[in-house]
Image (tube, grey):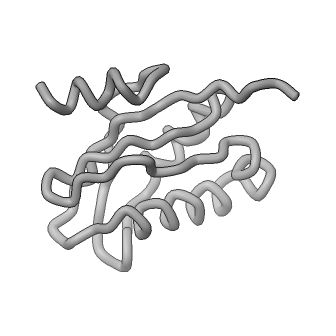
Amino acid sequence: MKRRIWRYLLVIVLSNEKITKDSLNSTLFQNLRYLYGEQIVVKTWPKVIYFNPKSKEAIIRCSHNAINEVRASLALITKINDHTAAIHVIRVSGTSKSLKGFLEN
């Protein structure tokens, strides 16, 4: 069995309402499923691995083969928990450590 290769996306959530890591994760799954179907959800394995509710910055992990599908799905999110929201991808990296270092600076 081959080892999975991951990509990590640093995103910022623009919303006036309180957002949680679980609500962001479920919205991402729902949007991917709606946009591409179950096969892409299984292929991408997206997961929010870090979320700062104060600054609303998040790191999302996904398969390297489906980075474009995840980016498109994130760009099309307009609501999280029935509140208006937008998500912008700031940076993509091969390691979560480099993104966490980028957040600290």
In the depicted view, which residue is nearer to us: 4 or 33?
A: 4
What residue do we see at 71% from left, 29% from top? 4
Above or below, 96 relative to 81: above
Coordinates of residue 64 in the picture (x, y in percent):
62, 26
Residue 97 percent location from the top left of the image:
36, 26
Residue drawn at (73%, 47%) of the image: 40
The structure residue drawn at horizontal position 61% and vertical position 39%, both measured from the top left corner, is: 69
Q: Is residue 88 left or right of residue 103?
A: right
**Numbered-mark total:** 0
Q: Which residue is rendered at x = 36% and y = 48% of the image?
A: 50
Estimate the x, y position of residue 56 in percent, counting from the top left. 22, 53
Taking the image as shown, residue 54 lies to the left or right of residue 12, namely left
Quarter of the image where the N terminus is located: top right
Q: Position of residue 71 (x, y in %)?
A: 49, 38
- Is residue 92 positioned above or below 88 on the image? above
Q: Which quadrant of the rendered structure holds the C terminus?
A: top left
Give the residue furthest to the right. 1
From this viewpoint, which residue is outermost toward the bottom?
A: 82
Residue closest to the eye, 65 or 73: 65
Task: Please say if 4 is above or below 27.
Answer: above
Among the 4 quarters of the image, the one containing residue 32: bottom right
**Between 28 and 7, the one nearer to me in the picture:** 7
